[in-house]
Image (cartoon, rainbow, N blue to C red):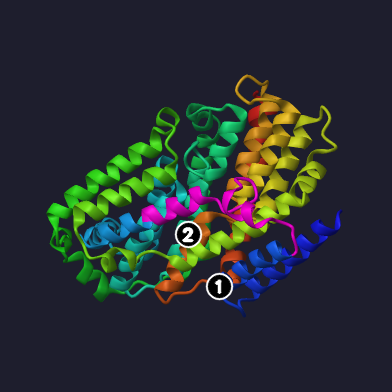
Amino acid sequence: MTLSAVAAVVVFAAAYVLIASEKVNRTAVALGGAAAMVVIGVVRGGDVFFSEETGIDWNVIFLLLGMMIIVGVLRQTGIFEFVAIWAAQKARARPFRMMALLIVITAVASALLDNVTTVLLVAPVTLLLCERLALAPVPFLLAEAMASNIGGAATLIGDPPNIIIASRAGLTFNDFLVNLAPVVVVLIAVFVGLAWLLWGRRLRYDPERAEAVMALTPRETITDQRLLRRMLVVLGLVLLGFLTHNLTHLEPSLVALLGAGAAVVLSRLPSDDYLEDVEWETLLFFAGLFVMVGALVNAGVISELAKTLTSTIGDHYLPAAQGVLVGSAVLSGVVDNIPYVATMAPLVHDLVGPGGALPPAQQSLWWALALGADLGGNATAIGASANVVITGIAKRNDHPISFWTFTKYGLVVTAVTIGICVPYVWLRYFVWG
């Protein structure tokens, strides 16, 4: 390992320890770590802003910014209160029934949209719902973050790593749906049971508050029907833009920014009304994290880890697939799964080639990579973009989720879901395939 690689590892490890200890603000740590990477020369200043491989991923930053503005405008219509009351009434105001309903809604929405957009839309509803019923929102937010990562694994557009894999392997939307959706359905069912064991047993039912919620009329919460109709059209067009990415070749970030611009123009709201929902601290944390992980990529650290993972493969595709599955889950929990997959995908391509026409045994490596990275993102608070967004929203609303609180539950969920995927990959691609 070169001197620059050692220096990058030291800086990243120090930043990771500080983030995990929570003794220093995580955004300050991420930005400080990014600055240190530039100062020691592991990544150049120009690369920070302009390199797709080792710089800030502006597609993620502007996707988040655009959707945060859209959510900020939507909030002014009262739609989140409407959905919160509707969900509570459908679940008869029973806490775990509501959690299970929100898990399923989040997972399905994450498959159809993407997991980051979904948590931005679902989190405000959850906070309002918990406030109405005097419930602690942290268990609900944790469950939704993890459900979004599981559900997002089902489709090409559900999780950013899947988009990278599809581009590199030449896989289609239907390829992801056929290969990953079946196991994701099983994983969501198992996760609902896990949610009962992890959080559901401790949720308390308040009959008086429940009765008050059941007596409400959801429609009365809508404060501006005209703006709501306009915003639903804007949101529909944004979602259509996400779904037709392969046809239009418009980046999701551009679609989100265009939608945000339309929302601002059509709403005519003062800027303070929608900008207050922008999680500026979360965006800055992402920027710093991208630079730190990009420095590891630039120094060759992640590629060396990935090569080590695949160096002993040869023609032994079953242990290779299982190694990629488990190894990707571990590494995606340590670094964000987006840069990890960006580094690993070319190695898998060199090893087995494009994914569409491969025999099942060889194609299994692509699906193992997708499942490992998507589900491994649940392991820690910084393993996936949705986790960072959820913890940012929670902190801003005075319900902070510590790094270790997220991780102690995330490790359990990751271990169980990856444990189910191990026999799935074996059966699907080596027994039935």
Rendered view: 214 above or below 245: below
Answer with left or right where residue 186 lies relative to residue 17.
Answer: left
Q: Which residues are magenta?
A: 40-67
- Residue appearing at x 59%, y 69% in the figure: 403
- Pick whichever of labels 2 and 1 is earlier in the sequence: 2
Rendered view: 183 above or below 269: above
Rendered view: 346 above or below 25: above
Give percent across and percent down for residue 234.
26, 45
Which is closer to the viewer, label 2 or label 1?
A: 1
Give percent across and percent down for residue 370.
61, 40
Rendered view: 327 above or below 145: above
Answer with left or right where residue 297 lies relative to residue 281.
Answer: right
- Residue appearing at x 42%, y 34% in the figure: 245
Around disc 2, counting alpha carbons within 10 Å, would you say few (fewer than 14), some (14 to 19), or many (20 or more)?
Answer: many
Which kind of residue does numbered mark 2 sit on? Answer: Ala
Which kind of residue does numbered mark 1 sit on? Answer: Ser
SS under mark 2: helix
- For the C terminus, the quadrant is top right
**Of 167 and 399, the residue lying toward us:** 167
Q: Is residue 320 magenta?
A: no
Give the quadrant of residue 379.
Answer: bottom right
**Of 290 and 401, the residue lying toward us:** 290
Around disc 1, counting alpha carbons within 10 Å, would you say few (fewer than 14), some (14 to 19), or many (20 or more)?
Answer: some
Q: Please give the residue where the numbered disc 1 appears in the rendered image.
A: 402
Q: Please give the residue where the numbered disc 2 appears in the rendered image.
A: 143
Residue 412 visible in the snapshot: no
SS under mark 1: loop
Q: Is residue 48 magenta?
A: yes
